[in-house]
Amino acid sequence: MSIKDKVIAIIAEQAVLEPSDVTMDSTLEDLGIDSLGLVESIFAIEEAFDISVPFNANDPSESDFDISSVSSIIAGIEKLVAEQA
């Protein structure tokens, strides 16, 4: 399973949707994921890829991690996984 597919599966699970319902342009808001769901998604992603996501749940705008869309989240995860390798 690719990084993209795995991230989409995690996000879909949080949103209680099918992975096919999650598009690259979707925002977490579009998918009905609230701040708690976002934090749970980040934890699930960190666990799945054994990485640490530079995300500040208390102040998301101050984070170095772009959560504006599914595609930006995937790009960020791919970068973190590549840096760790």
Image (cartoon, helix red, strand yellow):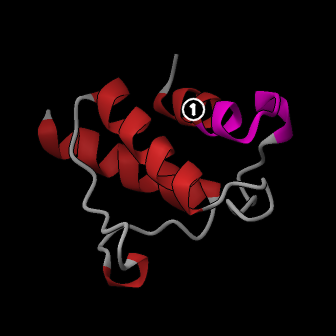
Res 65 → quadrant: bottom left
The residue that disc 1 covers is 10
Queried whether the magenta region covers residue 34, the answer comes back as: no
**Which quadrant holds the C terminus?**
top left
Which residue corresponds to the image point at 41% horizontal and 46% vertical from the top-left? 42
Residue 55 falls left or right of residue 15: left
**Percent position of residue 71, x then y:** 60, 55
Q: Nearer the viewer, residue 32 or 69?
A: 32
Queried whether the magenta region covers residue 16, the answer comes back as: yes
**Percent position of residue 78, x then y:** 37, 44
Q: Magenta segment, principal secondary structure?
A: helix
Q: Nearer the viewer, residue 33 or 85?
A: 33
Res 66 → quadrant: bottom left
**Percent position of residue 69, x then y:** 63, 63
Report the magenta residues as a range. 11-21
Residue 54 falls left or right of residue 40: left
**Percent position of residue 57, x then y:** 37, 66
Give neighbour class at mark 1: few <14, some 14-19, many 20+ (Cα, 10 Å). Answer: some
Does residue 23 lie above or below 26 as drawn? above
Amino acid tagged 1: Ile
Which residue corresponds to the image point at 38% horizontal and 47% vertical from the top-left? 77
